Image: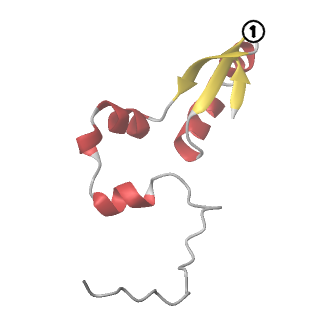
Amino acid sequence: MSWSVAKAKDNLSEVIRRSRSEGPQEISLHGEAAAVVLSAEDFRRLKDPRAAHDFKDWLLNGPSLEGVDLERDRRPTRDIDPL
């Protein structure tokens, strides 16, 4: 979500809460992105990528795969001619 500086200032607790539950919160100044509020956990991961708990955690918290076609091509494979 994007917040204006004034709205973020008036609702700082809400901005922080949403950064923890929904992800980074963008703050704009004069209509342009100026800053981002991250949860402490997200900041820790950015600061030290090795701090991720394990590969499974990394996969589960990665970008959404919604809209990515993961269906396997079911056409038969082609024959390979021996040399």
Drawn side of residue 71 relative to residue 29, left or right: left
Whole-percent x and y of residue 20?
A: 52, 41
Q: Name the quadrant of the C terminus.
A: bottom left
Query: Residue placed at 56% from the left, 35% from the top?
Result: 24
Whole-percent x and y of residue 9?
A: 66, 16
Furthest residue to the top?
30
Closer-to-camera residue (7/27): 27
Query: Residue placed at 45% from the left, 53% from the top?
Result: 62
Drawn side of residue 80 relative to residue 54, left or right: right
Closer-to-camera residue (73/54): 73
Q: Amino acid at mark 1?
A: His
Whole-percent x and y of residue 3?
A: 71, 24
Closer-to-camera residue (16/4): 4
Drawn side of residue 39 relative to residue 14, left or right: left
22 lies above or below 37: below
Quadrant of the rendered image containing residue 45: top left
Closer-to-camera residue (47/80): 80
Quadrant of the rendered image containing residue 6: top right
Q: Which residue is mark 1?
A: 30
Quadrant of the rendered image containing residue 34: top right
Q: Name the quadrant of the N terminus.
A: top right
Secondary-structure class at tag 1: loop
61 lies above or below 72: above
Query: Residue placed at 40% from the left, 59% from the top?
Result: 59
